[in-house]
Image (cartoon, rainbow, N blue to C red):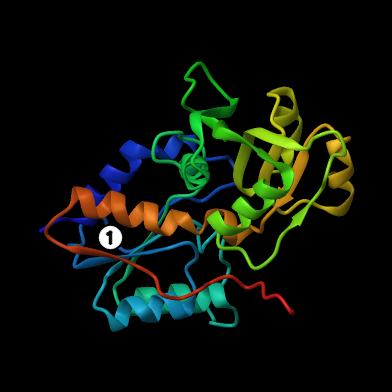
Amino acid sequence: MTKVKELIHFLENIAPLDLQESYDNAGLLTGSPDMQVQGVLCTLDTTPEVVQEAIDNDLNVIVSHHPIIFQGLKSLTGDNYITRSVIKAIKHDIAIYAIHTNLDKVLHNGVNQGMCQQLGLTNIRILQTQNEDPNIGMGAIGELPTELTWSHFLSKVKNDFSLETFKYTSAPEIDKIIRVAVCGGSGSFLLSDAIRAGAQAFISADFKYHQYFDAENKINILDIGHYESEKHTITLLNKLISNKFRNFAAHSTKINTNPVRFYN
């Protein structure tokens, strides 16, 4: 039988824990490293519904991109979704492991490489390198196989990310797209890097109103939504775990944890 610590060792070989941002809380959040893995549920977010899904399917490990415990908990009273999730997990002996900004910062098998692959980009590389390793850093950039018109690119993004709708800016002088920068989740801090790298489009999420002006007609911003930019991570984690371990099953959550809805 595989122990939780063996699963952790595998995941941290892909995305070392020391790569996480200082504000982050990736790692083992509930459960013991010595627990035996009966099955794994991969998810973007851990919610009470996701924990119940694990319980219902006899899966005793949840591997989540976003940490359910982000800041210190001062009480466990069940008065919010965070503590309800933690209480339910502990009560049912479910280990929760989060692999967050450390997975964002690795190129190989990372969140941003996954976004690039959804678009079919080639020559994929880190957008903002943070040390001497060119495969470690924030965001990614690559090239489309063929140049697309702006309207065709918008349609491609909508289809490739299965979007209902999304926000964007449109630079008047940029009507052809070949070089694309991406960042899963909140990536507005990388806008200047995308411009310097010569990208015609930057796909990310969580831009504030005034930040759209920072494009300065030098790049097109596509704000596709936080969940939408990272939901492929569920499948990514499932495939990585399934290809490595054969004595237990890994599953992808069937629950859409996106709290945002659109009114049409």
| Residue at 21% across, 50% down | 243
Task: Tell me if I can see residue 74 in this picture.
Answer: yes
Q: Quadrant of residue 54?
A: bottom left
Expressed as whole percent of the image width and height from the top left, the position of residue 158 reads: 62, 58
Q: Residue at x 11, y 59 (%)?
A: 247
Q: Residue furthest top?
A: 132
**For residue 46, side relative to residue 258 (left or right):** left
- Secondary structure at badge 1 equals loop
**Residue at (82, 53) in percent of width and height:** 208
Q: Quadrant of the C terminus?
A: bottom right
Q: Nearer the viewer, residue 135 or 132?
A: 135
Q: Is residue 9 above or below residue 53?
A: above
Q: Is residue 136 above or below residue 41?
A: above
Q: Position of residue 52 (x, y in %)?
A: 38, 81
Instruction: Locate residue 238 relative to residue 144 in the image: left or right.
Output: left
Few, some or many residues within 10 Å of mark 1 (<14, 14–19, 20+)? some
Is any part of residue 71 visible from this angle? no
Tell me the residue that label 1 is attached to: 32
User: Residue 193's image quarter?
Assistant: top right
Decide if residue 61 is on the left or right side of residue 123: left
Q: Nearer the viewer, residue 6 or 15?
A: 15
Task: Name the amino acid, label 1.
Answer: Ser
140 up-or-down from 246: above or below: above
Determine the residue positioned at 84% across, 46% down: 212
For residue 100, above or below residue 190: below
How many badges with numbers are in the image? 1
The quadrant of the picture occupied by the N terminus is bottom left
Say which quarter of the image contains residue 3: bottom left
Picture coordinates of residue 257, whole percent (x, y): 53, 72
